């Protein structure tokens, strides 16, 4: 009886040793063992240079606009692609959180260029952030504060009422654009060619600057808010300019 049990135990041992376990599955001994599946490749983020992907600063301002000059240093995945959108915010907190932009403007396709954001409030501070064509928001630059210029006390616009070979006549309107009366104004500009004033009426030539200028004639110096005065110029020139860009101040 003991002998038969030993034979049975030996047979059971042979039966057990005739199988192998591969990855939780039992296969016969001597059968081809399948190769183990390779471990998935580990991906790592690209090694980006230690530089800002884009730089920007405010380079010009008017009473109603700010101009931002930008330079894209790196392309994706480390940087950005143009065009660049400049978003303006009313506070640094809003800018940091990309919350409630008050105005935006978008550049052209250049990697180095400018963006002018208009429709702003005079004499007001703004902060700016940058994003690219794919909507990627720059994490580094919170620009500002940048302040728009104060509203000028007056504006001046010119219209060429007649022109001929050798000269033209211009009519200029000065308007008080402020909220307070002004008593005295001065208008100046730059000629585009060989223009020179021969006669002025309702204004007095004032050549104290680097270009041509006139000041009020005294009797038309006081202007209430919204009020205006008009003066004229007789100008000699070889070719009348299409427009004259004027500046005005008290």
Image (spheres, rainbow, N blue to C red):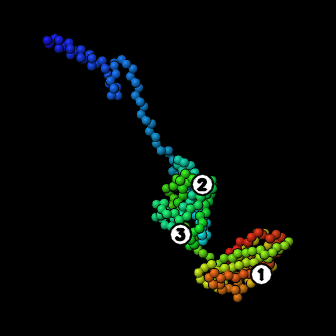
Please give the name of the residue rendered at 40% of the width and 24% of the height, measured from the top-left corner. 34
| Separation of marks 3 and 2 at Cα, in angstroms | 25 Å
User: Quarter-wise, where is residue 87 in the image?
Assistant: bottom right
Residue 41 shows in the view? yes
Q: Which circle's residue, 3 or 1, is located before the other in the chain? A: 3
User: Which numbered marker is on residue 221?
Assistant: none
Number of other residues with Cα within 10 Å of mark 3, as a class: few under 14, some 14 to 19, many 20 or more: some
Q: Is residue 1 left or right of residue 87?
A: left
The residue that mark 3 highlights is 125
Number of other residues with Cα within 10 Å of mark 1, as a class: few under 14, some 14 to 19, many 20 or more: some
Q: How many marks?
A: 3
Q: Nearer the viewer, residue 161 or 132?
A: 161
| Separation of marks 2 and 1 at Cα, in angstroms | 48 Å
Q: Helix or strand or loop: what does disc 3 sit on?
A: strand
Residue 57 shows in the view? no
Q: Is residue 133 left or right of residue 164?
A: left
Image coordinates for residue 136, horizontal then vertical, percent: 52, 53
Q: Helix or strand or loop: what does disc 2 sit on?
A: loop
Q: Which circle's residue, 2 or 1, is located before the other in the chain? A: 2
The residue that mark 1 highlights is 200
- Residue mark closest to the camera, 3 vs 2: 2
User: Which numbered marker is on residue 83?
Assistant: 2
User: Quarter-wise, where is residue 148 in the image?
Assistant: bottom right
Image coordinates for residue 215, horizontal then vertical, percent: 71, 82
Q: Nearer the viewer, residue 79 or 7?
A: 7
């Amino acid at each position: 009886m003991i002998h038969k049990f030993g034979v049975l135990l030996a047979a059971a041992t042979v039966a057990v040793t005739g199988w192998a376990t591969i990855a939780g599955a039992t296969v016969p001994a001597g059968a081809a063992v399948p190769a183990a599946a390779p471990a998935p490749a580990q991906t790592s983020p690209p090694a980006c240079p230690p530089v800002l992907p884009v730089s920007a600063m405010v380079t010009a301002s008017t009473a109603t606009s700010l101009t931002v000059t930008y330079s894209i240093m790196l392309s994706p995945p480390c940087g950005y692609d143009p065009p660049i959108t400049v978003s303006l915010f009313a506070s640094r907190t809003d800018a940091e959180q990309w919350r409630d932009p008050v105005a935006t403007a978008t550049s052209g396709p250049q990697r180095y260029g400018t963006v002018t954001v208009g429709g702003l409030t005079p004499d007001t501070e703004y902060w700016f952030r940058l994003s690219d064509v794919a909507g990627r928001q720059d994490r580094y630059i919170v620009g500002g504060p940048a302040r728009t210029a104060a509203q000028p006390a007056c504006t001046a616009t010119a219209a060429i009422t007649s022109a001929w070979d050798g000269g033209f006549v211009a009519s200029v309107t000065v308007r008080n654009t402020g909220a307070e009366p002004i008593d005295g104004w001065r208008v100046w500009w730059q000629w585009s060619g060989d223009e020179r004033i021969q006669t002025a009426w309702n204004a007095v030539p004032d050549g104290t600057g680097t270009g041509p200028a006139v000041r009020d004639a005294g009797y038309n110096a006081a202007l209430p808010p919204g009020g205006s005065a008009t003066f004229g110029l007789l100008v000699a020139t070889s070719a009348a300019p299409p427009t004259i860009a004027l500046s005005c101040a008290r």
